[in-house]
Amino acid sequence: MALFNFQDEEALGSVASVDTTNIVIDVENIEKLVKLQVNHLAVLQSSKPGQHLIGLITQVTRKKLDGYNEAEGEQESDFELNLCRIALIGTLLDRDGEKENIFRRTLESVPEINANCFSLEGEHLTNFMRIISNTAAEGQSLTLGKYTLDDHAIAYLNGNKFFQRHAFIGGSTGSGKSWTTARIIEQMANLKTSNAIVFDLHGEYSPLKGEGIQHYKVAGPGDVEAKKTLDDGVLYLPYWLLSYEALVSMFVDRSDQNAPNQAMIMAREINNAKRNYLEAGGQQDILDNFTVDSPVPFDLSELLDNLNAINIEMVPGSRVPKQGEFFGKLARMIARLENKLSDRRLGFLFQGGDDVLEFNWLEKLSTGVLGSTSENGRGGIKIINFSEVPSDILPLIVSLVARVAFSVQQWTPSTLRHPVALMCDEAHLYIPQRSMADAADDISIDIFERIAKEGRKYGISLVVISQRPSEVNKTMLSQCSNFISMRLTNSDDQNVIKKLLPDSLGGFSDILPTLDTGEALVVGDASLLPSRIRIDQPNNKPDSGTVDFWDEWQDDVPADRLTIAIDNWRKQSIQ
């Protein structure tokens, strides 16, 4: 049975102008015009039988004009121009094969001039939203909450398209961004073999619990001292996992006039150190094919000894020994390297113990961080806490985990790949605009840009999460085809989202600064309908709730709070 059976007398008005996807309606029913609201839905008769076009109301105009009545030959003062502008967003088919009432986000036709237009409201709206929900709910779908248009209709997203085409979740602080992310994570965790890594920069997702969720933290000074391991939920990311470019950015001062020589020597000696490790372990098959970027462990103390030897090398001269070619030219690099080695903040890189130098250690790390529940026995959603990583190398370390994930996917035969999603919270901190980037940022940007461009073919998805979209790398955002945008009050951030939306929906984004906490504008391939949605609460709220200052100031102060804070500050760890 067809969903819409409008009568002509119910018409809001008729089509006066058609311009691709934008339609202008000459409104005849003034009572209906007064009730119209921007961003609500309308239905238009299609030029094809068995179809109706669905549109979004973008503008309502009622304007009195002075007109001239030719028949009477006199001026009329009460002539009105009553118009409604509509952006077409899809087609409702009465029947498609054996299925009835199918909504598609395509426009197979446009309305004819004088075609009737109807406001979608009441029972018609409820029935239409029910169809949208049921269509999107086929299979294992992702639910966000309820449509603002009809709070009885559940807002579903197509889970496949959401991750296949990359996604952006954004909103000003306190708008409900972390809440939305937690809602998605909890549903992912319920899937049998879900696989995702959440970059948690502030530990705010630590309250999320469940069988499918596993928490890790990058080792802090206290964890290194206590010799905690992967089994304790502590991650070490050893130096030998870093690419050659990353190692150079960490150890070589680009402003040093000897920087080119230092980088060249570094490449040669790392290559030699890796060769020595493989020869000692009898890994002949890898020895024949490895490069300086291959993830092969090597002894850093051996590398340092060799660099020192080169820095003070004396070679035979015609009469007496003379200084070698690189005598004294590596001093600054060696000093930087020694300083990094003694920095307790970087224990997760340089003080992982003998375990991280074992040949099979990378497999253990990958199983823990990239394995699904069935592979690691812990949880497919891995939330990694980076809160104790120094801010100056944070981009380098976050991108290291991303690079490991991408490389594993890239080198897995296509028949054996299992998809993984990277959820990049606070993305503006490690995937900034090129103009704001330093050397460490450049390496991070290169890795994430490559994942954004090529990740789909290797089964790796990105979900970019940020409160400042204007500071996030433009290439990253341009690759996202799904947008969940909460309230944005900054004009620069609003403009970024507006530019990424289809031209026909440009006005839809004007509601961004007026969205309530927990409300989102959802647009993209995963959403059947560009919609305003009220997000449901997650079962476990992230630790990012807004503090009620006025109420808190009326309660008692927690005991020993300052003493505990200072003690944690000194230990560089929250107990």
Image (cartoon, rainbow, N blue to C red):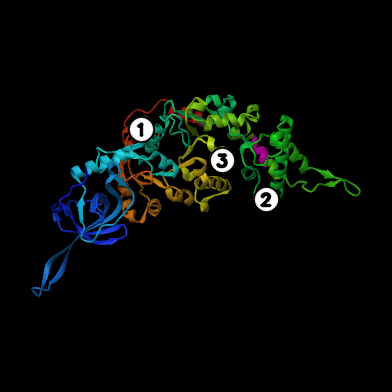
Q: Quadrant of the N terminus?
A: top left
Q: Which residue is mark 1?
A: 538
- Looking at the picture, which amino acid does disc 3 mark? Gln
Which of pointers 3 and 2 lies earlier in the amino acid sequence?
2
Q: Which residue is mark 3?
A: 410
Q: Against 306, is 364 above or below?
A: above
Q: CA distance from mark 3 to mark 2?
A: 36 Å
Q: Amino acid at mark 1?
A: Pro
The magenta span reads 336-341
Indicate which label's residue lies in the foreground, 1 or 2: 1
Provide residue 250's location: percent of width, then percent of height.
62, 43
Residue 35 painted magenta: no
| Disc nearer the start of the sequence (3/1) | 3
Secondary structure of the residue carrying numbered label 2: loop
Mark 1 crowdedness (10 Å alpha carbons): few <14, some 14-19, many ≥20: some
Residue reaching furthest to the bottom: 73
CA separation, marks 3 and 1? 33 Å
Q: Residue at x 79, y 48 (%)?
A: 325
Queried whether the magenta region covers residue 337, the answer comes back as yes
**Residue 427, how many percent across, how many down?**
47, 43
Vertical arrangement, residue 531 with respect to residue 381, above or below: below
Q: Nearer the viewer, residue 527 or 138?
A: 138
Mark 1 vs mark 2: which is more N-terminal?
2
Q: Which residue is mark 2?
A: 256
Horizontally, residue 242 falls left or right of residue 35, namely right
